[in-house]
Image (spheres, grey):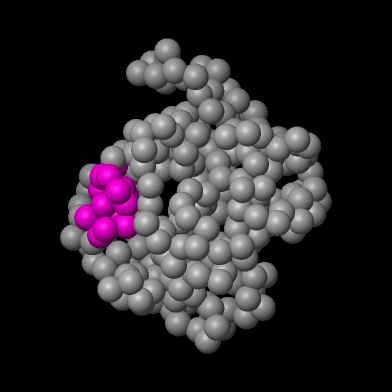
Amino acid sequence: MSLGESPVRTAAEVISTAAAAPSLAVLDQHITDCFACPRLVTWRAEVARVKRAAFKDQEYWGRPLPGFGPDDAEIGILGLAPAAHGGNRTGRIFTGDRSGDVLFAALYRAGLANQPTSVDAGDGLATKNTRIFAAVRCAPPDNKPLPEERDNCAPWLHREIDLIRPSLKVVIALGAFAWQAWWPAMTAVYGVKPPVPRPKFGHGAEVSLPGVPHLVGCFHVSQQNTFTGRLTPQMLDAVFARAKVLSGLA
């Protein structure tokens, strides 16, 4: 993937650059060249320099991650942020880590991906009718972005949703962080304010509002959830089956 010609270095530049992107391809290029959050820039670069022992011979991506999937997707999957030794290493969201293993195996079972594995950016993986993106595009320390980092990154998400708006029917929020990130995105893109009080996140929770994609909650595909049995393959399959029904794909 080629990088943007002009690095984005401030929150104000994120806003203006995202708003001006005429296509997903251009938006993706700009996202990969963002330096607006100093703490995240330092962290992603340090992880890419030090590396994990198992990947010591690999060149890490060490940059923000764009979304992945077709520009006419009916289903959007909204995650939290890239993993330090997953997407931050491979250059593709949910690729090269166990969360991605779980997610893409489920997408394959649902007929929404052409293969069940996501190993590296050149492995031939393609999603069907589904685009995956994150609320924060850089790997954060301890997997916990700061509020200002979330807010700095939000215009990238808002513009991405806006560009796939004509086809987008359902958004699956992976975890409470993504669930909360949806509300300002919904207002920014669709001009619709969230209900008061805001609906609570829960696995299988659904919110249907006029004129906006149907929102479905899903426990995050992290090891913390999948290893403990809080999220099972059957539970994940049920979410994707429901999303296909809501989007008209089933």
Q: Is residue 112 magenta?
A: yes
Residue 137 on image: x %, y %: 57, 45
Left or right: 109 with respect to 96?
A: left
* Depth check, front residue: 179 or 147: 179
Residue sticking out furthest to the bottom: 210
Residue 1: name its quadrant.
top right
Query: What residue is shown at x 50% (from left), y 63% (from top)?
Result: 72
Residue 211: name its quadrant.
bottom right
Range of residues picked out in magenta = 101-116
Query: What residue is shown at x 42% (from left), y 14% (from top)?
Result: 56
Residue 175 visible, this orientation: no
Compared with 209, 21 (above or below) is above
Residue 93 on image: x %, y %: 46, 43
Residue 169 on image: x %, y %: 46, 73
Query: What residue is shown at x 48% (from left), y 48% (from top)?
Result: 68
Left or right: 69 with respect to 124?
A: right
Residue 218: name its quadrant.
bottom left
Residue 36 visible, this orientation: yes
Residue 153 on image: x %, y %: 65, 51
**How many discs mark residues in the rendered view?**
0
